[in-house]
Amino acid sequence: MHTDSVEPWQHSHLYLGAKHKRHEQQLLFVVALTTVMMVAEIVGGTMFGSMAVVADGWHMSTHAGALLIAGYAYRFARRHAGDARFTFGTGKVGELAAFASAMILALIAGLIAYEAVRRFYAPVAIDFTEATWLAVAGLAVNLSSAWLLFDREHAHDHDHEHGHRHHRTHDSSFRAAYVHVLADALTSVLAIVAMLTGHFFGWVWMDPLMALFGVGVILSWSFGLLRSSGATLLDMVPDRRLALVIRKRLEMDGDRVSDLHLWRLGPGHVGVIAAVVADRPQTPTAYKRRLAGVAGLSHVTVEVHACADR
């Protein structure tokens, strides 16, 4: 070789989201904001006898815990982005954090459901006026958090290939946090409904009933996040349409793709390993050029084989 440096041919393995640092700071700020409200709802809801408000408080605690885990994951991923021990970088650390927080969330939902069912058989006195104001304050915090976590730049962000969206570039972990905050807002609304119906109609049973509705929302979010983060952790194909686009571009002039691996490396980053069989083989670089312009492909490896019949 004419040079001892192989740097031009190396991959950077930096697969963090475009706004990784900013998302980290936003998450930690929202954690501080919701922790204060969480304590107020759990303590106040217990004092005033409202299970729905307590449920909303515990839901906010899981929300704060999940965001805290996500915030730490962002920091860990950033600090270890260049660590050679991570074969494909630290872009999926956020997915691991999301999976763990979803498991915790499902566990807390089970505890809330148990307490709500118990309240059906052993109702307690509720101070509806005070509990309502707590729930309203919780809703205000949730809506403020949702506004802080709303990703305006990616709200309508779509990548296109021949007019079709083929790969999501947003940070799925951050997006999950935003959806989680909206779920928190819904449980606050349910708590407010429970307090108002109890105050005006005397329907004390609405309090545990609304808590159970809140449990349903929590479990729905939890299972959805388990599916999405689990799929990334198991290296499932992130977008079948993207796989078709890649295969179509590589299979030109009679060339055939014999093996194709496609997986998510991090927010907006996809890895590709492809094997091409050709009658007239070209260099791997030539095949990589065929994929130029396909957004999100951050780590591309192509191996080329000559057709045995030729």
Image (tube, grey):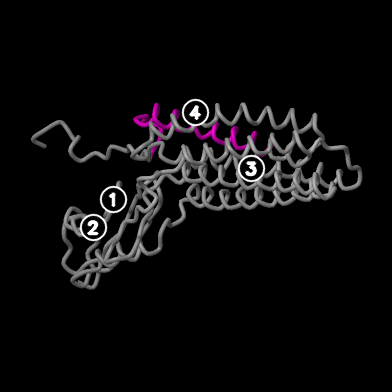
Residue placed under numbered mark 4 in the picture: 29
The prevailing secondary structure element of the residues shown in magenta is helix
- Amino acid type, label 1: Val
- Residue at point 60%, 50% (across, down): 221
Front of the two marks 2 and 3: 3
Q: Considering only order in the chain, which callout, 4 or 3, is on the residue closer to the N terminus?
A: 4
- Residue at point 26%, 56% (across, down): 294
Tag count: 4
* Real-space CA distance between mark 1 and mark 2, rounded to the nearest whole angstrom: 9 Å
Residues at discs 4 and 1 in contact (Cβ within 8 Å):
no
Front of the two marks 1 and 2: 2
SS label for mark 1: strand
Q: Considering only order in the chain, which callout, 2 or 1, is on the residue closer to the N terminus?
A: 2
* Real-space CA distance between mark 4 and mark 2, rounded to the nearest whole angstrom: 40 Å
Q: Considering only order in the chain, which callout, 2 or 4, is on the residue closer to the N terminus?
A: 4
Tell me if mark 3 has few (under 14), some (14-19) or many (20+) residues whose alpha carbon lies within 10 angstroms of its own.
some
Q: Locate residue 52 relative to residue 301 in the image: left or right.
A: right
- Amino acid type, label 3: Met
Residues at discs 1 and 2 in contact (Cβ within 8 Å):
yes
Q: Considering only order in the chain, which callout, 1 or 3, is on the residue closer to the N terminus?
A: 3
Q: Position of residue 165 (x, y in %)?
A: 35, 61
Residue placed under numbered mark 1 in the picture: 300
Residue 291 numbered tag: 2
Front of the two marks 4 and 1: 4
* Real-space CA distance between mark 3 and mark 4, rounded to the nearest whole angstrom: 23 Å
Q: Position of residue 109 (x, y in %)?
A: 71, 44
Q: Is residue 73 magenta?
A: yes
Q: Tell me which segment is drawn in magenta.
A: 58-87
Q: Nearer the viewer, residue 305 or 20?
A: 20
Q: Considering only order in the chain, which callout, 3 or 2, is on the residue closer to the N terminus?
A: 3
SS label for mark 3: helix
